[in-house]
Image (cartoon, rainbow, N blue to C red):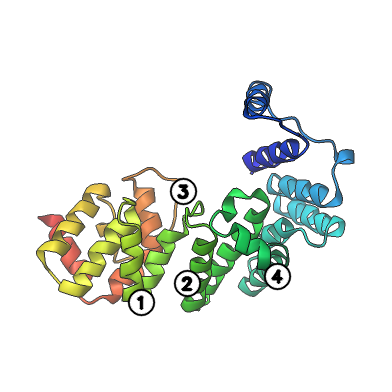
C-alpha cells in the first residue's frame, strides 16, 4: 500500500506539470528517480485527496485505528471509493462487506461509467483513480462466490476483463476456475484459448482437468497433466483435501502456489468422478 501511495503522489505531481516535449518528461522522471517522490502537504490537497491519504494511513494502522481513519475520510469526501474498499475488507460479516463494496461500486459507476467507460474501456487499470472501483468489483465477486452466487461472480470478473483485458488484477485465473465449477465449458474453452500462452498454474492444471472431462484418460489429457505436474509437483497430493492459502505471495513450483491453486480448484477436481484418482495415477508414472 505504501507503493500505491508513492504512485498516487507521482500522479499528483505529474498533474501539476506542463511538459512541452518528451525531453522534459524524461528529465522530470530522472530527477525524481534520484531524489524520490515528495509527499504533498495536506494544505495543498483538496478534500478528496486528503480523504485518500487517510485511507493510505488506515492500511498502515491497526484495524481499530484504520476503521476510524476510513470513517474520517468519508467525512471529508463521502464519495471516497477507497474508504469503502478498506471498510469492506475489514468486515467479518459477509453481507456487511458486500454493502461497503456495493457503495464503492455505485460511486464508481457514476464517476467512471457512461461516456467515461466508453472512452477508456480496455485500459482502466492504467488510470490510477479507477483502481479502488475495480478492487471493489473484484472483492464483490469474491463475496458472491462465497455466497454461492457463482454466476454473478463470473459476470463481475468478465466485466473487469472488459475494462482491462491486460488483467493486472489476475482475475483471468479465477475465472477459469469458476467457469469449470459452473460447467460453462464452452466459455471455458474460449477463455483458455485466449490465454493459451499464459503458462500459469491455473491454466495448466485446469486445461488438463477440462481435457479429462472431455476425453477421459486420453493421450492429450495425460500429456497436459504431466506438463502441469512439471510446473508444480505439490498440487496432486492436495486435491482431495481442503487447502488454505498459507502466504500472501508464492514462488513458481512452491507449496504455497499449490495451496493457492487448490483453494479455488480442489472442489472442481473432487466433483469430477475419477479425476483425482486419474491424476494420482499419472503422477505416479
As drawn, the label of residue 154 is 2
What secondary structure is marked by label 4? helix
Q: Nearer the viewer, residue 162 or 42?
A: 162
Q: Which labelled disc corresponds to residue 247?
A: 3
- Neighbor class of circle 1 (other Cα within 10 Å; few <14, some 14-19, many 20+) is few
Q: CA distance from mark 1 to mark 3?
A: 30 Å
Q: Quick check: can you spot residue 274?
A: no
Q: Residue 58 in the image: x percent, y percent?
A: 73, 49
Q: Are marks 2 and 4 in contact (CB under 8 Å)?
A: no
Question: Between marks 4 and 3, how big is the CA–CA gap?
Answer: 32 Å
Front tag of 2 and 3: 2
The answer to which of marks 4 and 3 sits earlier in the sequence is 4
Q: Which residue, given by chain and number where applicable, does mark 4 sit on?
A: 106
Q: Earlier in the sequence, mark 1 or mark 4?
A: 4
Residue 71 in the image: state x and y as whole percent: 80, 58
Q: For the residues carrying marks 4 and 3, which lies nearer the camera in this image?
A: 4
Amino acid at each position: 500500500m505504501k507503493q500505491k501511495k508513492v504512485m498516487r503522489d507521482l500522479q499528483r505531481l505529474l498533474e501539476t506539470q506542463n511538459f512541452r516535449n518528451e525531453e522534459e518528461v524524461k528529465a522530470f522522471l530522472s530527477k525524481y528517480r534520484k531524489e524520490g517522490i515528495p509527499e504533498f502537504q495536506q494544505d495543498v490537497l483538496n478534500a478528496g485527496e486528503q480523504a485518500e491519504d487517510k485511507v493510505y494511513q488506515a492500511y498502515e494502522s491497526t484495524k481499530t485505528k484504520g476503521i476510524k481513519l476510513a470513517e474520517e475520510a468519508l467525512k471529508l469526501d463521502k464519495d471516497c471509493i477507497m474508504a469503502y474498499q478498506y471498510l469492506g475488507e475489514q468486515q467479518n460479516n459477509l453481507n456487511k462487506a458486500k454493502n461497503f463494496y456495493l457503495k464503492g461500486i455505485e460511486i464508481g459507476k457514476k464517476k467512471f461509467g457512461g461516456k467515461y467507460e466508453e472512452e477508456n474501456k480496455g485500459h482502466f487499470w492504467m488510470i490510477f483513480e479507477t483502481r479502488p472501483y475495480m478492487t471493489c468489483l473484484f472483492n464483490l465477486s469474491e463475496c458472491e462466490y462465497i455466497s454461492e452466487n457463482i454466476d454473478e461472480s463470473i459476470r463481475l470478473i468478465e466485466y473487469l476483463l472488459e475494462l482491462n483485458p491486460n488483467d493486472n488484477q489476475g482475475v483471468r485465473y479465477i475465472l477459469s476456475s469458476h467457469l469449470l465449477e459452473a460447467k460453462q465449458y464452452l466459455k471455458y474453452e474460449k477463455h483458455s484459448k485466449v490465454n493459451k500462452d499464459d503458462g500459469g498454474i491455473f491454466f495448466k492444471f485446469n486445461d488438463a482437468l477440462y481435457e479429462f472431462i472431455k476425453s477421459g484418460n486420453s493421450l492429450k489429457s495425460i500429456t497436459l497433466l504431466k506438463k502441469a505436474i512439471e510446473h508444480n509437483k505439490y498440487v496432486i497430493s492436495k486435491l482431495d483435501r481442503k487447502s488454505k492459502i498459507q502466504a500472501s505471495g508464492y514462488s513458481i513450483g512452491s507449496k504455497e502456489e499449490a495451496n493457492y491453486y487448490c483453494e479455488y480448484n480442489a472442489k472442481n477436481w473432487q466433483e469430477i468422478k475419477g479425476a483425482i484418482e486419474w491424476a494420482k495415477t499419472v503422477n505416479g508414472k
